[in-house]
């Protein structure tokens, strides 16, 4: 089931955010994500966030800011089970165009987004981490 984020969900969602970032972005020190943890909790409450629930437990979420995908995060134990695709398809149903940034070293995410119809628009640099990234876009 997909539903909008509720304030009571914030700790679970923020923990998924932290764990997923540390695992997926092994090339960025974990301290970077830990230092941003409290700020991200505040930002999540201001963004449009849809959570994926399974057995009344939040297993993943997608954050949107207009047409920009802030991120798709799925709990470690539920990865590679189609939850990211379900969340992305839900967002596609609400927008006619989606944009996102993805680190160039995160080849698993790049492959996922390409399978889902996203195309690399150009490469750039994430100033906060010093890591190269791609801007990817999808449209109907």
Image: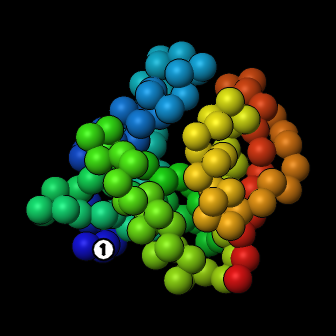
On-image quarter of the N terminus = bottom left
Rendered residue at 84%/40% (across/down):
124
Q: Nearer the viewer, residue 37 or 96?
A: 96
| Residue 37 quadrant | top left
Rendered residue at 48%/53% (across/down):
72
Residue where numbered disc 1 is placed: 3
Mark 1, Cα crowd under 10 Å, few <14 / some 14-19 / many 20+, is few
Q: Nearer the viewer, residue 123 or 110?
A: 110
Q: Nearer the viewer, residue 111 or 37?
A: 111
Q: How many marks?
A: 1
Q: Nearer the viewer, residue 64 or 78?
A: 78
Image coordinates for residue 87, horizontal then vertical, percent = 43, 66
Question: Is residue 77 in view?
Answer: yes
Rendered residue at 50%/73% (across/down):
89
Image coordinates for residue 40, horizontal then vertical, percent = 45, 43
| Residue 11 quadrant | top left
Relative placement, left or right, of 27 versus 10 is right
Relative placement, left or right, of 74 versus 117 is left
On-image quarter of the C terminus = bottom right
- Please tell me whether residue 18 is drawn above or below residue 94 in the rendered image: above
Tell which residue pokes out farthest to the right in this image.
Answer: 122
Rendered residue at 47%/63% (across/down):
85
Image coordinates for residue 33, horizontal then vertical, percent = 48, 28
- Please tell me whether residue 130 is drawn above or below residue 38 in the rendered image: above
């Amino acid at each position: 089931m997909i539903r909008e984020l509720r304030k009571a969900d914030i700790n679970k969602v923020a923990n998924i955010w932290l764990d997923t970032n540390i695992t997926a972005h092994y090339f960025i020190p974990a301290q970077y994500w830990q230092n941003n943890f409290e700020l991200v909790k505040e930002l999540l409450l201001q963004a449009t966030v849809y959570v994926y629930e399974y057995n009344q437990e939040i297993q993943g979420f997608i954050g949107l800011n207009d047409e920009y995908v802030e991120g798709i995060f799925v709990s470690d134990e539920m990865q590679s089970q189609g939850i990211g695709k379900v969340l992305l398809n839900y967002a596609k149903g609400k927008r006619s165009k989606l944009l996102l940034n993805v680190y160039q070293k995160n080849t698993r995410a790049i492959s996922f987004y390409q399978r889902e119809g996203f195309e690399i628009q150009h490469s750039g640099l994430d100033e906060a981490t010093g890591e190269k990234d791609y801007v990817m876009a999808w449209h109907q």
